[in-house]
Image (cartoon, grey):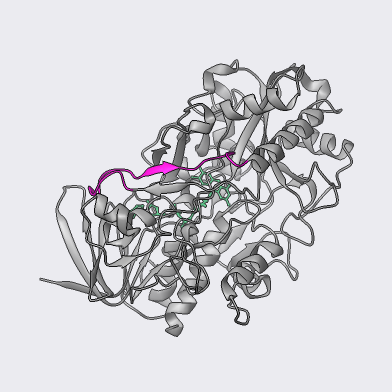
């Protein structure tokens, strides 16, 4: 028996959940959402510190590994991605950031070519951000309070976070009460996509309220292998279930691929949409020759600096023994205490080159020794604090390629973090700036020793060596099926996220963006989904 739907959404992540729920409820279309991962109801996902338990090993994550990165002396590093309904929004640190207005004005400028505005300028996307948002503190031109996505101030603030905010102020930076408001610059406390510490993912905000709607069919553990393309038109998809049984589903409407920036290009290529030479290499019939598929991978590089505390400060040991019991009870009974915190509360946006210019570095203060699994052993396990610095407008570009034509194989991912000399230069200045922050009062008074990088040698060469050893993803891969203007030979999508050369096929997730926003990417991914739902409902 053939099964058919009005639309099929591939990947139930931050973007895919928004698209599927809105097409089914507001668009009154029969929608199939296929998600490779697990159900999102689990205590580890619901409570913010769960991220620390998951980051280095969990069934809710897929751990992509990079190919050896020659410019990092051959290092291989992980890129974990959500493998659960809600995707990244179900596993992330919940920091609510949009980037800055100029990010979106830049998108629109890139995409419009010689035309008028094409719907991506700040003025166009702000109503989406506001409309999706239910902010617990801010209600103004920048923030909404009626949307399904709960955004809240931190439920708990650790002493290290407060000392960090004071120390950055001591460096001359202003206090910023809203990084998503008038100005990004300064230091302050982030807002989070949760309420009383309970996660507000795309699954909770969009799929849960639509669960009883018969138009929406959600299938978990459904791994899509490819999109069926016939006579230049997408007509369905092939997926397999956990038993390995293969199913084909059809649509007269659209197939919307939202499998994330590392998998969406892989699925396009397996469907015959991609660079012709690369497809031929793997014996895949070319349906649309698009050289940009899998190219233009952008990610935010993150480099940690870690200091050991001279007292029992921070979140170390808060999750063990009697403290775990006490903190767990406080969370369960009152929705308060350390368990409401994802372990990062304070942050900063600075430009070490020119304080008045748009920030080039975002920093996160993590009140614990926090490193990836491949660098974990390099710093003693003790009370401490980690500050991570992130280049927010990187120039480096990487790529995603097929390892083989076997859909079960992970793609080859080469993100080239810090490969561009300007990115490295910016990162070095960011590290130097925050090393000085660690030496400001009141933070300095609580620090026994800066463990990495060495504060004794802050030469470019020494900090660059530290960056090469420790750089990792800030978990924001993007740009691998980018929208582009007519005439851009590397454009995969038009400005409405439609795949060039194939009818009824869109890609809508972080792979679609022409450049990365200056900040975390979950709210932008959800905004993309919201805008895509509008476009599909309007038939444009
Ligand atoms: C550990 C971590 C921490 C982060 N912290 C933050 C943060 O604090 N704040 C912030 O704003 N952003 C954060 N991010 C980034 C943010 O969550 C992502 O940018 C965002 O979720 C990307 O959304 P997306 O829709 O592009 O892809 P995803 O949300 O990754 O969705 C892709 C979905 O497709 C599914 N899928 C993949 N392959 C297939 C297939 N073959 N068939 C069917 N389904 C498939 C996946 O399981 C997934 O559910 C974090 C991300 C991670 C991983």
The C terminus appears in which quarter of the rendering? bottom left
Residue 415 part of the magenta segment: yes
**Relative horizontal placement of residue 86, taking residue 114 as reference (left or right):** left
**Relative horizontal placement of residue 180, taking residue 355 as reference (left or right):** left
**Spot occupied by residue 498 in the image (x, y as percentages of width and height):** 42, 73
Picture quadrant of residue 306: top right
**Spot occupied by residue 419 in the image (x, y as percentages of width and height):** 57, 39
* Main secondary structure along the magenta-highlighted residues: loop
| Nearer the observer, 407 or 23 | 407
Picture quadrant of residue 34: bottom left
| Nearer the observer, 54 or 234 | 234
Picture quadrant of residue 207: bottom left
**Spot occupied by residue 192 in the image (x, y as percentages of width and height):** 63, 51
Total labels drawn: 0
Q: Is residue 460 visible?
A: yes
Residue located 36% across and 58% down the image: 11
**Spot occupied by residue 164 in the image (x, y as percentages of width and height):** 78, 34
Q: Which residues are magenta?
A: 402-420
**Relative horizontal placement of residue 62, taking residue 167 as reference (left or right):** left
Residue at the limit of the structure toward the left, as seen here: 1
Up-down: is 474 above or below 70? below
Up-down: is 319 above or below 229? above
Residue located 79% across and 53% down the image: 177
**Relative horizontal placement of residue 53, taking residue 289 as reference (left or right):** right
Residue located 89% across and 36% down the image: 170
Up-down: is 176 above or below 539? above
| Nearer the observer, 93 or 517 | 517
Q: Is residue 368 visible?
A: no
The N terminus appears in which quarter of the rendering? bottom left
Residue 126 part of the magenta segment: no
């Amino acid at each position: 028996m053939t099964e058919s739907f009005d639309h099929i959404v591939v990947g139930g992540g931050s973007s895919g959940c928004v698209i599927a729920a809105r097409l089914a409820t507001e668009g009154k279309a029969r929608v199939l959402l296929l998600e490779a991962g697990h159900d999102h109801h689990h205590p580890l996902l619901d409570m913010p510190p769960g991220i620390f338990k998951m980051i280095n090993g969990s069934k809710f994550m897929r751990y992509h590994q990079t190919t050896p990165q020659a410019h990092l002396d051959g290092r291989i590093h992980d890129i974990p991605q959500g493998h659960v309904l809600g995707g990244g929004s179900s596993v992330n640190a919940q920091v609510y950031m949009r980037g800055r207005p100029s990010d979106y004005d830049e998108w629109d400028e890139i995409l419009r070519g010689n035309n008028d505005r094409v719907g991506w300028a700040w003025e166009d996307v702000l109503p989406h951000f506001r409309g999706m948002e239910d902010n617990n503190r801010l209600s103004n031109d920048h923030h909404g309070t009626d949307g399904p996505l709960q955004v809240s101030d931190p439920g708990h603030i650790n002493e290290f976070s407060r000392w960090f905010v004071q120390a950055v102020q001591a460096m001359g930076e202003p206090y910023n009460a809203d990084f998503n408001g008038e100005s990004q610059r300064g230091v302050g406390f982030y807002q989070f996509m949760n309420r009383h510490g309970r996660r507000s993912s795309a699954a909770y905000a969009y799929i849960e309220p639509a669960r009883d709607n018969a138009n929406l069919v959600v299938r978990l553990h459904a791994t899509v292998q490819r999109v069926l393309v016939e006579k230049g038109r997408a007509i369905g998809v092939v997926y397999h279930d956990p038993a390995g049984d293969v199913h084909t589903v059809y649509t007269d409407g659209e197939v919307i691929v939202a499998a994330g920036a590392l998998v969406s290009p892989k699925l396009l290529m397996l469907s015959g949409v991609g660079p012709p030479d690369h497809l031929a290499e793997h014996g895949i019939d070319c349906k649309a020759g698009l050289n940009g598929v899998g190219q233009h991978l952008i990610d935010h590089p993150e480099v940690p600096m870690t200091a050991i505390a001279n007292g029992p400060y921070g979140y170390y040991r808060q999750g063990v023994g009697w403290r775990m019991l006490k903190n767990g009870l406080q969370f369960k009974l009152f929705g308060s205490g350390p368990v409401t915190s994802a372990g990062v509360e304070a942050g900063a946006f600075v430009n070490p080159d020119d304080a008045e210019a748009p920030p080039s570095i975002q920093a996160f203060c993590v009140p614990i020794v926090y490193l990836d699994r491949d660098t974990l052993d390099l710093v003693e396990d003790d009370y401490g604090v980690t500050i991570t610095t992130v280049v927010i407008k990187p120039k480096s570009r990487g790529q995603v390629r097929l390892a083989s034509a076997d859909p079960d194989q992970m793609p080859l991912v080469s993100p080239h973090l810090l490969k561009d000399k300007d990115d490295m230069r910016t990162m070095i200045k960011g590290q130097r700036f925050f090393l000085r922050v660690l030496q400001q009062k009141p933070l300095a008074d609580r620090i026994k020793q800066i463990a990495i990088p060495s504060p004794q040698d802050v030469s470019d060469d020494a900090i660059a060596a530290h960056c090469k050893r420790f750089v990792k993803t800030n978990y924001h891969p993007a740009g691998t099926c980018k929208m582009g203007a007519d005439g851009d030979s590397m454009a995969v999508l038009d400005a409405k996220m439609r795949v060039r050369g194939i009818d009824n096929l869109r890609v809508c997730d972080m792979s679609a963006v022409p450049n990365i926003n200056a900040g975390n990417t979950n709210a932008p991914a959800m905004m993309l989904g919201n805008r895509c739902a509008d476009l599909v409902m309007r038939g444009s």
